[in-house]
């Protein structure tokens, strides 16, 4: 009877590893353009828009920089309460993971591990800006990755073959 670990390509002496080597705030902006008027109680909840973007860049054979960008805005135009932009980075090390899985691992696991820190930054700055803390709901980075890959496939398919 064959060993299932052997047939799956798993080497117990060299298990897959994913480590965060460093994490850091790359860029940050908080705007409260209508203070102190924006701090007055409102009759209705503001419309809050949240955008998420993830990028990964190789830095060496095993190390990658992951960038998690979060933008959160409450209100629009003259009624804007706040606007937040956070670019949070992490340096991760990937070892003993098959090459065909590294891209997905970096762009799913990297932001998943960085997200709680970005969430705390957003909550703290909104509270410090005079508002209730904005607690961003957990993000499914696996689904975000799949959507991004499907979008890239559609864009490449729409361009057609190169001449």
Image (cartoon, rainbow, N blue to C red):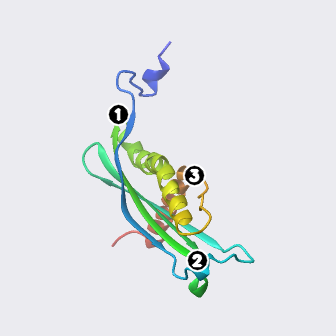
Q: What mark, if any, has residue 140 been given in the picture?
A: 3
Name the residue: 55% across, 80% down.
35
Is residue 126 shown left or right of residue 14? right
Task: Give neighbour class at mark 1: few <14, some 14-19, many 20+ (Cα, 10 Å).
Answer: some
Query: Which secondary structure, mark 3?
Result: loop
Residue visible at 50% across and 64% down in the picture = 125
The quarter holding residue 89 reads bottom left
Q: Which residue is mark 1?
A: 96
Residue at 40%, 49% in the rendered image: 103
What is the residue that sits farthest to the left in this orientation?
60
- Crowding around mark 2 (Cα neighbors within 10 Å: few <14, some 14 to 19, many 20+) is many
Residue 9's x, y, as percent? 41, 28
In this picture, is 103 found above or below 135? above
Which of 119 and 58 lies nearest the eye of the viewer? 119
What residue appears at the point 51 percent right and 50 percent down from the top-left corner?
116
Quarter of the image that includes the C terminus? bottom left
- The residue that label 2 is drawn on is 81
Q: Earlier in the sequence, mark 1 or mark 2?
A: 2
Q: Could you give the CA–CA distance between mark 1 and mark 2, rounded to whole angstroms?
A: 47 Å
């Amino acid at each position: 009877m064959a060993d299932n670990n052997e047939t799956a390509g798993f080497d117990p002496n060299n298990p897959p590893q994913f480590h965060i080597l460093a994490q850091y705030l790359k860029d940050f902006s908080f705007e409260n353009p209508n203070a102190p008027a924006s701090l007055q109680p409102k009759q209705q909840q503001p419309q809050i828009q949240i955008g998420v973007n993830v990028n990964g860049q190789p830095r060496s054979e095993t190390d990658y920089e992951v960038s998690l960008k979060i933008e959160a805005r409450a209100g629009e135009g003259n009624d804007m309460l706040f606007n937040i932009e956070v670019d949070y980075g992490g340096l991760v090390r990937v070892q003993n993971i098959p090459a065909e899985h590294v891209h997905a691992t970096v762009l799913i696991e990297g932001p998943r591990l960085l997200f709680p820190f970005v969430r705390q930054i957003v909550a703290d700055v909104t509270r410090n800006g005079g508002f209730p803390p904005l607690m961003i709901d957990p993000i499914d980075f696996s689904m975000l990755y799949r959507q991004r890959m499907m979008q890239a496939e559609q864009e490449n398919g729409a361009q057609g073959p190169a001449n």
